[in-house]
Structure formats: structure tokens, C-alpha cells
Image (spheres, rainbow, N blue to C red):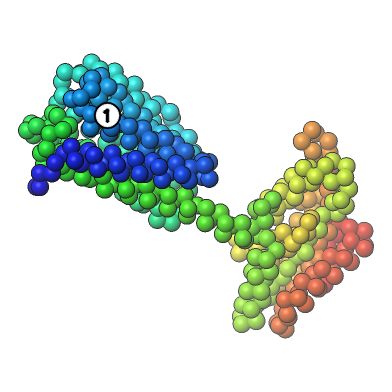
Amino acid sequence: MIDLHTPTLLLVILVVSFTLSATLASVARRFKRDGMMYWAWGFVLHTLTYVLFVLRGHISDLVSVVLANTLLAISFALISEGVQQFLQVRWSRWLVWAPVPLVAVLFFVLLGHAHTRIILSGVIIAWQCALIAWQLGSQPDKTTGRGAYFVIGSFLAISAAFVLRTVGALSGEAGIGSINTSNPVQSATFLFVSVALMMVCQGLVLMTNERADERNRLLAMQDELTGLSNRRFIMEALALQLAQARRSGKPVSILMLDVDHFKSINDTYGHLTGDRVLRHLAAGLRNRLREQDMAGRWGGEEFLVVLPDTDAVGAVALADHLRADVESAGWSTPDGRSISLTVSIGVHTCDSAPEALDTVISAADEALYRAKQAGRNRVEQG
């Protein structure tokens, strides 16, 4: 194995860590709710740690050994906190922060026992890095794209490097008791760390950007208030279903649903209550519909539901179930006042004859208008 100059490798890690901390800090404000602020501070402390390591022998061992390793443990704990904030989950705090006081106390007590400190630091740092990798790997549904894999792989590499250093200390590798001594184990450890740190930063930034892109994609498709499809996306979905229906000959139905007297709800109880009603109504639609059905907010208090492979009888039956669900739901304001809420629904079914998108929507809208003219809280078929 090539025996590299360890002090130079430590200096490389210091420069890399400083560059990464500056990079993360420059974008932390924009992504602070995604853990970026924790990561930026973690790399700031990581940089300071290696400053103290480089100064080993020129400053007090209390600073270059005890304080430096304590700061290193804190840096990984902050990165772990950032991962939890990014994933929007919370694990037991002692798993994340217990290594910090443990390092501070043990390294103070063992200040004169270099080999023992090497073994302890290797085990503790390997544990912290493996914990970060496990946190990300255990929540695949909370990450998007490949950034998380970069971070997981990088922290597993750092963990493996410090396990290697621990094994070297246990096997009596010459010179490993001093951090500034050059030997193959030291060289491999710090070379791994310097490369892995660059991959960590790239992974964290990529992971955050991928989430931002996913949010933008969802905003382009979803109604922000209700979480249902927005008007543009539900129209695209309906156009696709109509095209498939023409090819397959299977029916497709749509429901145009409108909340009765919604303006009076806003005027009487306030717009926040009106928004709450729309969110609950959207949740009720999601619970009642099949997996292949689609619902979207058409505008204001109107919703459009697309029902693939559904004939007129099935569509009217579903519409009446939805109407009855809303009427019997027992709606109330946050302060406990009851709200009488009903909906009117227009139904239109395309059987065999192909119909244009505008024609289908217009037919459902006309059926909804008739339902309102006939007294509301009813279903009409167009």
C-alpha cells in the first residue's frame, strides 16, 4: 500500500471540509427547512476539527485531542440532525448525541493513552457515520433521485475507513498512535475520508435539489389547497382517458361537483373555514374513489372526477354516494359551530360514440346546472 504523507492528507481534508462548509452555507438559507443549516454548521465544525488536528504538537493536547474529537462528534451529530429534518422524522436524541459527552469524557480520561483513543474514536465515528447512512436508507420514500445514494455510500465509506483504522490500532500497526505519523493505515483512512467528504457534499446538494424539483413538479400538477390534481392536470388526464376509451370501446364517466351555497359559508364563517371545508371534501373524494379514478379541483368550490371504465349506472350511483356522504358528514367550524353542507353533482358518460373534450365537460357542467336549478343537493345526468 502507498504510504502517503499524513499531515498533507490532513491539510487536504481541512481544505475540502472548508470548501464544503462554505458551499453549504451559501445555499443553507434557501433550504434551511431541508436540513441544510445543520449540514452547514456540521461542516464548519468539521473544518475546525481538522485545524486543531493539523496543529497537534503546537497547541495543548486538551485542545488538539479532547476538544478536537469532541467537535468531530458534534459535527456528525449535526449532520444526523439535518438528515432527520430533511426526512421529517425524529429518532431518539440519545442515539445522535450520546457520542458527544462520551468522547469528551473518555478522551480527557485517556489523554495519555493514544492507542486506546484511536480505537475508541474509530468505533464512535464509524457508529455515527453508519447511523447517518442507516437514517437515509431506512426512509426510501422520503428521498427522490440519486443524491441519497451518494450520501449513504459516502458515509459508509467513512465508517469503513475508521473501522480500518481501529483494526490497525488493535493489530499494533506501527506509528498509528500519532495522527501526524505517515503509515499505510493512516494514508488509506484519510484518503478515503477526503474523497468521501466531497461525495457527501455533492450528494447533500443533489438530494436537496432533487426534492425541490419534485416539489415544483407536484405544484405543476396539484392544487396546493386540496392536494388533488389541478385543473390543467385533470384535463390532461381526462383527455388521455377519452383517447383510451375510443380505442378500447369502454365507457368513461365524469362527475362535475359543486359545493352548494359556498359563498355563504365563506361570508358567515370566514375563508379559513371555507378552505377547511374544501380540504375535507377533497379527502372524502380520495377515500371514496377507486385507485384508477382521478379527482381534481376545477376551480373555486368545483371539482371534476374522472371515472375510467365506468358506465352511467355506476357513475350515478357513485355520485349519489358522494352526495350522501357530504350531507351526513356532520361538518363544523374549528370553534364547534355546525355547518350544513351539501353538494350538487352533474354526471356525463361517454359510451361508444367518441366525444370531444370540451363537449364532455360542457355536458357535465350543464347537468350540474340542472341539479342546482332543481333545488341543489342532488345528482343530474347529462
Between 37 and 56, the one lying in front of the other is 56
Name above or below for residue 75 compared with residue 359: above
Per the image, the residue denoted by label 1 is 52
**Placement of 5 over or under 299, stated as above or below:** above
Residue 326, placed above or below residue 364: above
**Residue at the far front in the pictured view:** 58
In the structure shown, which secondary structural element does the residue marked by tag 1 occupy? helix
Q: Is residue 331 visible?
A: no
Q: Nearer the viewer, residue 330 or 170?
A: 170
Q: Quadrant of the C terminus?
A: bottom right
Q: Give the camera-side residue of 297 and 324.
A: 297
Q: Position of residue 124 (x, y in %)?
A: 27, 30
Residue 24 point in image, percent of width and height? 42, 44
Task: Tell me what residue is drawn at x 10 percent, y 44 percent.
Answer: 3
Q: Amino acid at mark 1?
A: Leu
Residue occupying the point 85% across, 46% down:
265
Q: Is residue 90 above or below residue 191?
A: above
Evaluate whether residue 363 shows in this view: yes
**Residue drawn at (93%, 62%), measured in percent from left and top?**
374
Q: Residue at x 85, y 70 (%)?
A: 366
Quarter-of-image position of residue 163: top left
Task: Please state if 286 lies on the left or on the right of 94 as rendered.
Answer: right
User: Measured from the top left, where is residue 379 in percent x and y?
Assistant: 83, 62
Q: Position of residue 82 (x, y in %)?
A: 44, 38
